[in-house]
Amino acid sequence: MSDAPETHINLADFAADPYPALARMRAKTPVTYVPELGATLITRRDDIHTQEKRTEVFSSRQPDGLMTRLMGENMMRKDGEAHMAERRALFPALSPRTVQEHWKPIFQAAAREQIKRLIPRGSCNLVTDFTMPVSAMALKAITGLEAMTNTEMDGVSQSMIDGCANYAGDKGIESRCKRATRFIDDHITDAAQSPPDRSALQVMTDAGLPEDSIRANIKLIISGGQNEPRDAIAGTIWALLTHPSQLEMIRDGRATWADAFAEYARWISPIGMSPRRVDRADTALGVTFEPEDRVFLMYGSANRDEAHFAVPDNFDITRNTQPAISFGAGPHFCAGAAAARCLITEVALPLAFTHLKNLRLAGDVPFTGWAFRGPVKMPVKWDS
């Protein structure tokens, strides 16, 4: 175990609102061992940005880690050439050009169909009735698992991310995650007979990746490609509705939907953490790390680091978000970033605010999570 100073947290409070505890860590113990998580947390932005690239020490390979045990060894759990080979194999499905030319029209058609269904209703839970199906329809297309229902895609994604964040060892969460991965495997088997054009399943098969790698990477895409856009679309809408002057800036051309999403992703960090395994003994940031130590790179803390962001707890779409590491940094920068930005900023946000007239909140919007964070529900109304 590292010799970092200890910090204790209340897990329920941390899930409800991690930012006060993270701010205290940045100020007093920026590298700290948290017994409740069994990990050493690195909380300052520049430290994370530097150490994340030192994969020879802070390795992504975690043979005994939750993600590997539950989902298989995907490219996110590999470093060096092993990681890059699988990333190159997947790239044709997720390149910016493919996103714009192939996926964007599919995203638009799905989102428009969902908006059309909603308009006459006048109210809904935006998470379950708009952002979940829009995200799921996009993800079914990208992965090639088109036979899944939207609800099934959302359910297996949530079960997997819950499993990957199950550091408390809840057996029920682990069991649900295992059922989800078996369900996905069944759909991969069926879809592999004739994978859809340009889908992740097709391009990785054509590249000759081993079957276990294809299956693990499809699960990786699902685990991040559903909940994060789902939560980011809803969360950005919530942020703009609770900051009407900033929404007005977008409407009159002084800011863009991309500005709003970039600031939301900094402020809330839908991906709040990335785990690493210490591969060899090393001293960094004044702390001695031992082999097999578990380290969490806390993106949710880095994105509120006072050294880079003035008044970091405020939502401000005019700020420079360049220092934020919302999609990670270094070799493991999110492979699906172009697809996520397109779906969120070019499709879902403008469609919602254009077609749901006088969109407004109709109740409380509770948030939860620290490894993955987003709104639990979002009741809204509009003029139908």
Image (tube, rainbow, N blue to C red):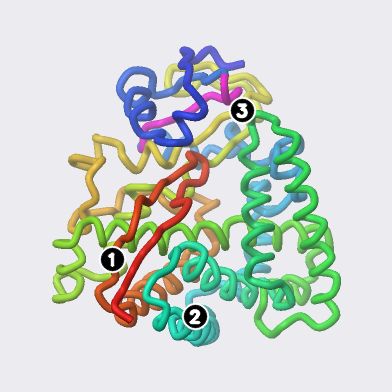
Q: Quadrant of residue 314?
A: top left
Mark earlier in primary sequence (1, 2):
2
Q: What x and y, as percent, mark residue 339?
A: 50, 71
Report the residue marked by disc 3: 294
Give 123 or 176, whichever is nearer the viewer.
123
Where residue 81 appears, as percent x and y from the top left, is 67, 53
Q: Is residue 194 visible?
A: yes
Residue range corresponding to the magenta coloring: 36-45
From what the image shows, is residue 127 above or below residue 299?
below
Magenta stretch contains residue 213: no
What number of labels is visible?
A: 3
Q: Is residue 231 left or right of residue 267?
A: right
Q: Is residue 41 magenta?
A: yes
Q: Residue at x 53, y 52 (%)?
A: 331
Q: Nearer the viewer, mark 3 or mark 2?
A: 2
Determine whether, in the image, residue 237 is placed left or right of residue 214: left
Q: Which residue is mark 1?
A: 360
Residue at 55%, 62% in the rendered image:
335
Quadrant where the image shows the N terminus: top right
Q: Earlier in the sequence, mark 3 or mark 2?
A: 2
Q: CA distance from mark 1 to mark 2?
A: 18 Å
Q: From where the camera sits, is residue 221 visible? A: no
Q: Is disc 3 placed on a helix, strand or loop?
A: strand
> Crowding near pointer 1: few (<14 within 10 Å), some, many (20+)?
some
Q: Residue 108: x and y, percent? A: 47, 84
Residue 299 occupies which quadrant of the picture? top left
Mark nearer the viewer, 1 or 2: 1
Answer with left or right where residue 121 lies relative to residue 171.
left
**Amino acid at the residue labelled 2:** Gln
Mark on residue 114? 2
Q: Is residue 258 left or right of residue 318?
A: right
Nearest the eye: 110 or 253: 110
